[in-house]
Image (cartoon, rainbow, N blue to C red):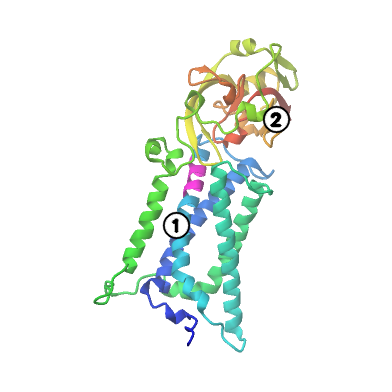
């Protein structure tokens, strides 16, 4: 019995495996990856700001938009990546030229870049999605790994584009005067245009049914979003509860202190007696969800003025949280001096719930939720 011959690249005759199709899908996927990378870079610098970079406190909702786009672009990249891989997988059956030549080296470099690119991108999208669920079944630190993989993806992408540039340029635009594609008589299936519509529709559907976690008007149809707006204590979701942070309540002798040029100490009633201000700001978390809320409390710049801090002072915020990566945070001068930045005591017209940081928390414009420190009991002025 004769065994069937192994498939070759020429065994796949569908017009959907054409370089033009791969180029179009590559453009879409490349756009999603670029948006995801740039917004992810912005989020990383928000949490690890280098000394040479000064991030602004306005627009107040910039981080909310940026991180929403980050998670959205990463989500829609999944169907785009799958479609792109399906289009080009016959290339896996292409036989490298023999004997070795310059062309063979180019093909080897191309396949190596694809291996790195696809592996890193698939892992990046997977751990990014799992992070939105706040599930970490791996031993490595998520944020540092996510950041490193992003640079590996960009490097591999540039190598891949450099190798494939002649082919990409040849198929970037549709051939002039090309006739509309039709299937041969008796043949059924997707045309190229049908494939493009299917992929675009799938990506759009996935995006619309997940972006509701950061766009409240789409919340009712956010069936793929891990978080829903308005669900949580006082109408605002919570990532880290007081129990998880090891905060069970406050002692009757609790005092809020400021370590600065002048040492200040307040009871909760004394904080409430200080001039109160209001800020309408969102909580915007790295997982992509966000929720606007009304906050009331004492302006940070008023507290700094009371303790005699200079106008350009940075502030270290210290929480009662037991351990964790974000038990302390720092407010750069631009944020500490912004009139919207509060030591918040009330949320949506009521005293802070314990899970939202009772007795006091930080709320500032254009900041990730992990830096809006809860259960604050001390400020340290850094000149």
Q: Residue furthest bottom?
A: 99
The residue at the point 35 percent across, 71 percent down is 174
Q: Residue furthest front?
A: 1
Compute the Cα span from label 1 to label 2.
Answer: 43 Å
Report the disc number at residue 79.
Answer: 1
Q: Secondary structure at mark 2?
A: strand
Q: Which residues are magenta?
A: 65-72
Let me know if residue 68 is in the magenta part: yes
The residue at the point 50 percent across, 46 percent down is 71
Q: Which residue is mark 2?
A: 316
Q: Quadrant of residue 305?
A: top right
Q: Is residue 234 above or below residue 47?
A: above
Count of marks, rendered view: 2
Q: Position of residue 231 (x, y in %)?
A: 47, 30
Q: Position of residue 45 (x, y in %)?
A: 62, 44
Q: Is residue 332 left or right of residue 160?
A: right
Q: Quadrant of residue 95?
A: bottom right
Report the disc number at residue 357.
Answer: none
Q: Is residue 69 left or right of residue 252?
A: left
**Secondary structure predominantly adopted by residues drawn in magenta:** helix
Q: Secondary structure at mark 1?
A: helix
Q: Is residue 370 above or below residue 93?
A: above
Q: Is residue 92 above or below residue 256?
A: below
Q: Quadrant of residue 169?
A: bottom left
């Amino acid at each position: 019995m004769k065994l069937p011959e192994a498939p070759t690249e020429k065994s796949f005759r569908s017009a959907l495996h054409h370089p033009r199709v791969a180029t179009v899908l590559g453009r879409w996927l490349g756009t999603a990856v670029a948006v995801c990378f740039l917004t992810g870079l912005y989020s990383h610098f928000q949490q690890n700001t280098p000394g040479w970079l000064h991030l602004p406190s306005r627009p107040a909702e910039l981080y909310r938009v940026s991180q929403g786009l980050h998670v959205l672009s990463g989500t829609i990249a999944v169907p785009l990546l799958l479609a792109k891989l399906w289009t080009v997988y016959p290339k896996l059956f292409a036989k490298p030229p023999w004997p070795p030549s310059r062309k063979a080296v180019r093909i080897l470099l191309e396949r190596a870049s694809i291996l790195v690119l696809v592996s890193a991108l698939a892992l990046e999208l997977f751990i990014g999605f799992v992070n939105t669920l706040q599930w970490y079944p791996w031993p490595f630190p998520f944020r540092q790994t996510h950041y490193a993989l992003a640079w590996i993806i960009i490097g591999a992408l540039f190598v891949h584009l450099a190798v494939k540039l002649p082919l990409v340029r040849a198929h970037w635009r549709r051939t002039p005067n090309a006739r509309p594609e039709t299937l041969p008589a008796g043949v059924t299936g997707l045309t190229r245009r049908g494939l493009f519509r299917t992929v675009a529709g799938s990506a759009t559907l996935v995006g619309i049914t997940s972006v509701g976690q950061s766009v409240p008007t789409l919340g009712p149809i956010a069936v793929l979003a891990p978080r829903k707006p308005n669900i949580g204590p006082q109408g605002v979701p919570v990532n880290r509860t007081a129990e998880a942070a090891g905060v069970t309540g406050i002692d009757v002798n609790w005092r809020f202190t400021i370590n600065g040029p002048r040492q200040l100490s307040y009871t909760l009633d004394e904080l409430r007696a200080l001039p109160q201000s209001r800020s309408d700001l969102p909580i915007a978390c790295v997982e992509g969800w966000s929720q606007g809320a009304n906050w009331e409390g004492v302006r940070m710049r008023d507290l700094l003025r009371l303790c005699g801090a200079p106008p350009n002072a940075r502030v270290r915020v210290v929480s009662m949280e037991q351990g964790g990566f974000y038990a302390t945070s720092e407010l750069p001068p631009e944020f500490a001096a912004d009139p919207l930045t509060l030591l918040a005591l009330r949320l949506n017209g009521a005293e802070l719930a314990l899970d939202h940081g009772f007795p006091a928390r930080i709320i500032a414009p254009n900041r990730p939720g992990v830096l809006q420190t809860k259960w604050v009991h001390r400020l340290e002025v850094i000149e």
